Amino acid sequence: MPPNLENDDLVVFIHGLTGNRETTWTEKKTGICWPEGLLPVDLPQARIFTYGYDADVVGIFKIASSNTVRDHGKGLANDLSLRRLRTKSNDRPLIFVAHSLGGVICEQSLLICRGAAEKHLQDVLESTRAIAFMGTPHAGSDLAQWAKTLTGLANVLRKSNPEIVGVLKPGSETLANLQQEFHVMLDARQKNGKKPVKMFCFFEEIAVVGVGEIVPKHSAILSAYGNRGIHADHMEMTKFSNAKDAGYQAVSDQLWLWVNDIESELEQSKAKAAEDRKISPENVRQGREKMMQEASSAGIVSSGSGASFSGNQVAGRDLNVGRHM
């Protein structure tokens, strides 16, 4: 979707395995892609960007010749940072919406930005204000839970994409470590006075027929953050047919809340900056010079013992120092 450079906030959508930048968010019967057809009405002040990558890759959970989770995270970091740099929007706030294992790609991307030497990559992490996870497995270091979650996902993908089944190895220690590293990074940033990254988790409420829940509630939520269910299965929880859909309202309301908070903070920051400019040393100096000029023109003579009046002057004259009315 082409960016609207007049707007401030950037909302980035990231799909999961076997999805893409359009179909993951498109309701089949109506053909509505809600990031394009619905959300701009509720968030007219935001730029909306759907990120696409090759989700049907071999070895996404293997550490053999390459770590493809890291590759995808690096791709997201590079593409997004350069787009922001070229459109002169690299200082604008970022909000991510990530479905399923796209949430893992998002986390990996931010970890890469943390360790990057290039400022435009660092800016992505510094600008990230919130992440909405939709059916993302947050099993942490519980390898048994990873096995259950990934096995369920493999059972679903077997029906539509047999080539990827063999690479969904359960008990992924790599992903468990990534989760831990990501949250350690967030805790460290907050302790160092950085703005916290707000997060909210949406979980599926309906099981896939013949398979069950793909990412169960206890795996999809994070205990320290808010959560709520969407009345759909794992694949359909990102597809909304109209603005009255309960799932759409839940997600769009959360995004609106974050955007509203960001705008309020920006307004407060602008007001503080304007006030600081009023009382800056330079303005105080200019105010004093103006006062002395007015005093001189009024016949007030400065002496070592204070102000003395010569001629017939009116007492009680008001002089504003350092303020512009």
Image: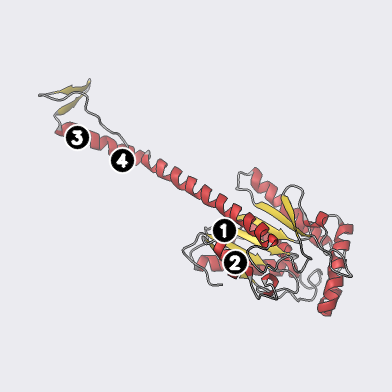
The CA span between labels 2 and 1 is 29 Å
User: Label 1 sits on what residue type?
Assistant: Asp
* Quadrant location of the N terminus in the rendered image: bottom right
Q: Is residue 88 above or below residue 295?
A: below
Q: Residue at x 19, y 23 (%)?
A: 315
Residue 302: percent from left, percent from top:
19, 27
Query: 190 or 233: which is nearer to us?
Result: 233
Q: Residue at x 45, y 47 (%)?
A: 270
Residue 317: percent from left, percent from top:
21, 28
Q: Residue at x 82, y 54 (%)?
A: 218
Q: Residue at x 79, y 76 (%)?
A: 58
Query: 84 or 205: which is nearer to us?
Result: 205
Label drawn at residue 324: 4
Of marks 4 and 1, the one in the foreground: 4
Q: In the rendered image, which residue does mark 2 sit on?
A: 38
Of labels 4 and 1, earlier in sequence is: 1
Assign a secondary structure to mark 3: helix
Residue 32: percent from left, percent from top:
64, 73
Q: Is residue 72 above or below residue 288?
A: below
Q: Quadrant of residue 38?
A: bottom right
Of marks 2 and 1, the one in the foreground: 2
Q: Is residue 281 above or below residue 194?
A: above
The CA span between labels 2 and 3 is 60 Å
Q: Is residue 286 above or below residue 110?
A: above
User: Label 3 sits on what residue type?
Assistant: Glu
Of labels 3 and 4, earlier in sequence is: 3
Label drawn at residue 123: 1
Q: Is residue 145 left or right of residue 255?
A: right
User: Label 2 sits on what residue type?
Assistant: Leu
Q: In the rendered image, which residue does mark 3 sit on?
A: 294
